Every structure is written in structure tokens, then in C-alpha cells.
Image (cartoon, coloured by chain):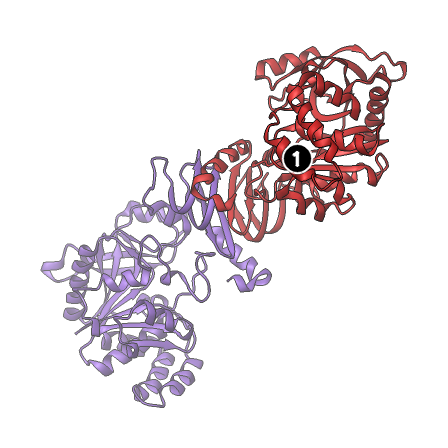
Chain colours: A red, B purple
């Protein structure tokens, strides 16, 4: 059966002051009435049965998940005792899936991305599932890039996959490339054989565990220590003990880059990782003819190209190209194009106002 | 004796969201730790005895005055039952002064202006008192203009006053001119014989009452109806009855423009009527080397020439030339040079959010 694992352990700070430690980006209604994680679950409808939905998160966000995703069986919300990057989270989920379903095929999905073309998403997932089942390899979704973005990792294509019916969209992976500099990104785009690494993966649960065993033996041992306790009273203690000695490593760096059989399905999904307020502003629907997106009670005079969110009354006069995020206890005013610096603000707040994080 | 009458009936809306109906501009700490009206009273020290301080205001602001100016005898805070512009307020005060002191000389002072050169202020007030006493005429302070401002009224000079010792600074007034257009304002400045009308007046109480009797007989009758009740139980009722039929008219239009003996003392006081947030921003002391004036807890990244007031935490990134006034229930974000439009915002709020005014 096909299972989906929603990775919800993120603690991003780039959406301050809307995002806070107790409510990171995936739990916010960004670019939609629903939250990003709700949309992530909703777009699986018709692809994955509700009883095959899983999530991995941490204790702090368990309640937010249960509140926002009542469709998920609480027993399938896996709680990591501490964040160890994606490889341990995925390994843990794979062990749980295997215990529930020895033939489990696993969709690994970030909880905080945007996908506007759900029909294409279903189609490429089905292709990826086919490839994963037929080859026993590891499959990733690679997004056709539309600009030389320096904020994403890239995947270089190799030969087509040996499956006639998917040969236009499934490829063997030649290399994974880290976030490039501008010149390199332009070369990638120009070459035509690079895709953006989406962080979405499809594989049989036993396949990823085999690769973990081969490449990350310490993680494999930790998972071995946990597995016998799944569903027992000793689970929490075993999990904590194992995580204490588990290596902190990403699935890309720890497994994908040197895995044996790695495939990529090329896709166009109207995708974004929604990485900054600028990305939100650039993708927001305009609320007037002057390029503004206004959420809340705002009186505008000569305002253009501005993105304003507020729960209070705001008057804006003569401004252009600003992002204004107004929350009850903190306010962000940021020129469009500068929202990467929100991270530095959060850094400054750690000493000055930790309670506002 | 010299008495000072502080005109505190203003209900200005140009400092929203800091100013509100219950707390207009004169009661706000603008450009100082003290409020504008506190500074108005403080700068009279050494010029007018505390027991000769008076204020005219309305019922709504009586408490603010008593709180902010404990130096004033509460019996000398005159309460108008309704606003009727400056002529009735000044006439009422003159009748009270005369009842207390038949030789009263009266300084009439707006409560919400800025004067940075207090020594010059004292000196020109003394000159004006001399001229008022010696001529029995009406004296106004006229400010040497430094720009073709279209937001102020102007006073045109005529011959020097016939008093040798003040002849460099006291002049007969030829005309009062309303707020001019730009071209006219430039002509005024170029001619060299126009001064800004400050709204500060000096005269004997009996002199202004004589002119009121001559030019505004309806107001004179109303004051006649009130005067016998000053200090009696019937005062409030007489005042209300008289005000109900009092004409609404300014002292400039109703009296000064056609008065008999009108003098102006030319002065330079570091004066401003503090008419807008822009004026505040332009006169604020910089709090860093980038032209910013920051009042409150603000994290700045690449911010220049901005004026920010807040009681919460604000993060500002990549902004230039903005005015940000953040209050607990409303926020103003305004490009510098555009704060005249605050009046339009207030207009819009009258229907949308009267409670925020």
C-alpha cells in the first residue's frame, strides 16, 4: 500500500512575526485559508487513503498537528524526542510503516510547501510509485526550474529510466548539487539537465532502510534498537535512548547522494517552498488594481505593490513595495526583496526578546 | 498685571493615531518628554506669575488640563460649552480677566506650538506688552519666515511703530493675508515685508473687548449676558445660554483684520505650529548616523531617514523615508512628505472606525 509521511518537524524562523517557536510556518494559513500542512494533507485525497497518513514531528507541535489534521490517526503522529535532521525522521517512519505493512510504499512530503497543480502532483506521484516499485530504487521529484534560483539544491539528470511508458519524465540521477552560486545556477539552467530538488521522495520502506543500513550504520543500529518496542510500553524510553546517539544528518547528504538506484521524476507543479515573505508577496493574489495584497482592515492612500497583513486597523499613505506583517505583539515592516533579512532579526531577538520568538 | 491665556480647545486630527478625540495634539509629548501644553506653560516662567495663568478649553479636556498643568488654579480653567472658534473664547477670557484685574494685559497663546528660543520669546513678549500698553492697540507676534510656506497666514508690515526703543521690531500692520498659494507665498517672501501669523496676541483686556463691541456686537451682547454671573451659581446656565447664540468666528477674521490700531512684533523664535507628522520628523533629533529617529524598541536593518514610534517590538528592514506611528490599537505607515493625508484617513475612520478617533 501507499503511505504518505508528512515531515512536520520544521522550526523555520523566516515568517516571523507570524511564525513563532510554538507555531512554525507549516501551521500557518499562508497563501490560503487553510494552513500549509492542511493543504499538504488535503492534496493527498484520492492518492493516499486517510488511514495511511503519517506525520513526523516533535512534542512541541503534537497538539498543532492533532488540531489541524484530525484526519490523521493520532497513533500515526510520530514524535521525535529531538530534531536530528531528515534521515533519522525518515528512517523512524519507515520502520513504523514496515511494522504496519511489509510492502509499504512511502511518499515523503514536506509539510510546508505550496503546490498549485494538484492534478499534476497526483500524476507524477503515480509515476514515481511505479518507478519505485518496479526498480526497488529511490525516487525523488525534480521540479523543472524557471529561474536560476540560488536558494534550492539541484538534481542533474542522467539517462532515461528503462520503463517505456514513463521514459519522458523519469530519469536516473547523475548528481545532487548543493545550493549553487549565481553563475553556477545560470549554468545549470542553461544546460537544461538540472531540476530543483523538491525534498519529496518515493520509495518502498524496505528500500530506504536497506540504503540506511548500508550508508548510515549508526542510524540503522538506533532504528534496530527502537523497532522491537513499536506498539509497546517501552517505546518512548527506547526512542529517547536511541535518538540520544543517532547521528544528525539529512537524507540527501546521508543517503541520496551515494545511493545505488536513484531516480528522479521531472515535474511542473506550480511548486514553491514558500521560503520568505517575499515569496508570499510575489504569489499573493492582488486585492486592488495597484498591485497590493491586503489582508485585514487597512485604509490605503496612494499605496502600491504592497503586502499588508494585520489584525488591527492600519492606515498606509504614500508607500510602495513594502511588506507589513502586523501581529498583536510585534510588527515587521520590510521592503520587498529584503525579507531574507528576517532571519537576522530573529537572531537579534534571541537575546533581546526571546519571548517574541 | 500681565496674564496669559492658553488656548487649549483644539481638536486637531493630524496626529492620528497618537492623537485622539479625548487627547488632541496639545496633550501629547511631541518633540519633547513634556507635552506641548506643558511646554507652553513652562516657557511662561519668569514672564507671567503662576496665579495669572488661564486656560480656555472644553468639558472633554478639563481633566487633561488639570492633570497636565497642576500649576493653574482650576478656577482659571475656563470651559466653553461648545467650540465657537477663537473670538468667543478670547472674549470670554477677557471678561474673566477684567473681573479679576481691571488693568489686565493679556497674552493669548496657542497651547500646541513649538518654540525653541525661549529667551527671544520672553524678550518679544515684553516688547509687545510695552506696545500694547503704550498704544492701547492690539499686538500680534509675527514670525520671520524662512520658506514660502502655504500652510500659514501672513501679516504684511507697514510703518514702524512710533516708539523709538522698539522701532526695529514693532510695526503697524498693513494687512492680514489668508494662507496663500505657492506663487503668492513666494512673492510674500521675496517682498521682505510679510511675516507668518503666529496666533499669539498681546493686548489690554479692555482693548480687545472694545474692538469686539465695535465689530462683533452679537458676541459683545453674549459676553454682557455672561459677565454679571462670573463667580456666581448662575454662571454655567448663563454661559450655556449665551454660547448658544454666539457667532462662530475667529479673532483674526472677526476682529484683527479691521481693527483700529494693530501692531506686529517681528520675531524669530525657533517656532513651529507642529502641524503634521512630517514636521515632527523634520524636527526630531536623529538617534543614529542614518537619519533615523527611533522611539521604542525597534530592530533596524538597512533603515534610513525614518521616524518610528512604537510601544511594541518593531523590526524594520530595508526601508527609507517612512514615518511609522504604532499605537496599541492602530498603526500609521506614511511616506515622509505625505502626512497631510492623515486628515483624509481620519475622515475615512469617521464612518469605518469612529472608536479609533
Q: Quadrant of residue B337?
A: top left
Q: Chain of mark 1?
A: A
**Where residue A62 sits in the image (x, y, percent)?**
67, 44
Examine the rendered structure and indicate whether residue A268 appears above or below residue A214: below
Task: Confirm whether residue B245 shows in the render.
Answer: no
Residue furthest toward the right?
A165
Task: Confirm whether residue B36 shows in the render.
Answer: yes
How many numbered dots are placed on residues in this image?
1
Looking at the rendering, in which quadrant would you find the N terminus of chain B?
bottom left
Depth order, front residue of B25/A31: A31
Q: Is residue A93 left or right of residue B254?
A: right
Q: Secondary structure at mark 1?
A: helix
User: How many C-alpha atoms fall within 10 Å of the one at disc 1: few (<14), some, or many (≥20)?
Assistant: many
**Where residue A16 sits in the image (x, y, percent)?**
55, 41
Residue furthest toward the bottom?
B233
Depth order, front residue of B100/A83: A83
Q: Is residue A151 left or right of residue B290?
A: right
Q: Which residue is mark 1?
A: A239
Examine the rendered structure and indicate whether residue B195 appears above or below residue A60: below
Name which residue lies at 78% across and 40% down: A42
Name which residue lies at 34% across and 66% down: B252
Depth order, front residue of A231/B304: A231
Examine the rendered structure and indicate whether residue A209 appears above or below residue A354: above
Amino acid at each position: 500500500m501507499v503511505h504518505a509521511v508528512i515531515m512536520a518537524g520544521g522550526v523555520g524562523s523566516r515568517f516571523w512575526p507570524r511564525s513563532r517557536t510554538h507555531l512554525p510556518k507549516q501551521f500557518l494559513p499562508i497563501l490560503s485559508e487553510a494552513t500549509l500542512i492542511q493543504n499538504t494533507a488535503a492534496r493527498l485525497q484520492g492518492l493516499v487513503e486517510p488511514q495511511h497518513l503519517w506525520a513526523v514531528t516533535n512534542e512541541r507541535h503534537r497538539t498543532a498537528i492533532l488540531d489541524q489534521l484530525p484526519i490523521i490517526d493520532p497513533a500515526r503522529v510520530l514524535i521525535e524526542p529531538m530534531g536530528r535532521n531528515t534521515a533519522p525522521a525518515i528512517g523512524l517512519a519507515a520502520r513504523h510503516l514496515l511494522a504496519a505493512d511489509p510492502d509499504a510504499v512511502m511518499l515523503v512530503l514536506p509539510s510546508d510547501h505550496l503546490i498549485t497543480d494538484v492534478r499534476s502532483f497526483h500524476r507524477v506521484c503515480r509515476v514515481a510509485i511505479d518507478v519505485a516499485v518496479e526498480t526497488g530504487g529511490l525516487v525523488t521529484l525534480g521540479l523543472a526550474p524557471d529561474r536560476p534560483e540560488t536558494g534550492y539544491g539541484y538534481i542533474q539528470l542522467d539517462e532515461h529510466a528503462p520503463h517505456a511508458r514513463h521514459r519522458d519524465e523519469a530519469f536516473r540521477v547523475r548528481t545532487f548539487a548543493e545550493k549553487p552560486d549565481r553563475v553556477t545556477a545560470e549554468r545549470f539552467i542553461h544546460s537544461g539537465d538540472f531540476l530543483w530538488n523538491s525534498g519529496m521522495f518515493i520509495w518502498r520502506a524496505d528500500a530506504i532502510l536497506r540504503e540506511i543500513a548500508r550508508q548510515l550504520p549508526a542510524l540503522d543500529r538506533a532504528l534496530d534498537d527502537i523497532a522491537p518496542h513499536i506498539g509497546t510500553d517501552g517505546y518512548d524510553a527506547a526512542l529517547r535512548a536511541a535518538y540520544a546517539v543517532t547521528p544528525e544528518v539529512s537524507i540527501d547528504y546521508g543517503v541520496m547522494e551515494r545511493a545505488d538506484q536513484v531516480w528522479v521524476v521531472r515535474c511542473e507543479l506550480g511548486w514553491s517552498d514558500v521560503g520568505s515573505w517575499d515569496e508570499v508577496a510575489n504569489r499573493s493574489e492582488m486585492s486592488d488594481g495597484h498591485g497590493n495584497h491586503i489582508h485585514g482592515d487597512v485604509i490605503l492612500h496612494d499605496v502600491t505593490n504592497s503586502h499588508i497583513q494585520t489584525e488591527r486597523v492600519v492606515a498606509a499613505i504614500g508607500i510602495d513595495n513594502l511588506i507589513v506583517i502586523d501581529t498583536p505583539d510585534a510588527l515587521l515592516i520590510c521592503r520587498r526583496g529584503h525579507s531574507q533579512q528576517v532571519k537576522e532579526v530573529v537572531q537579534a531577538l534571541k537575546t533581546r526578546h526571546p519571548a517574541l520568538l
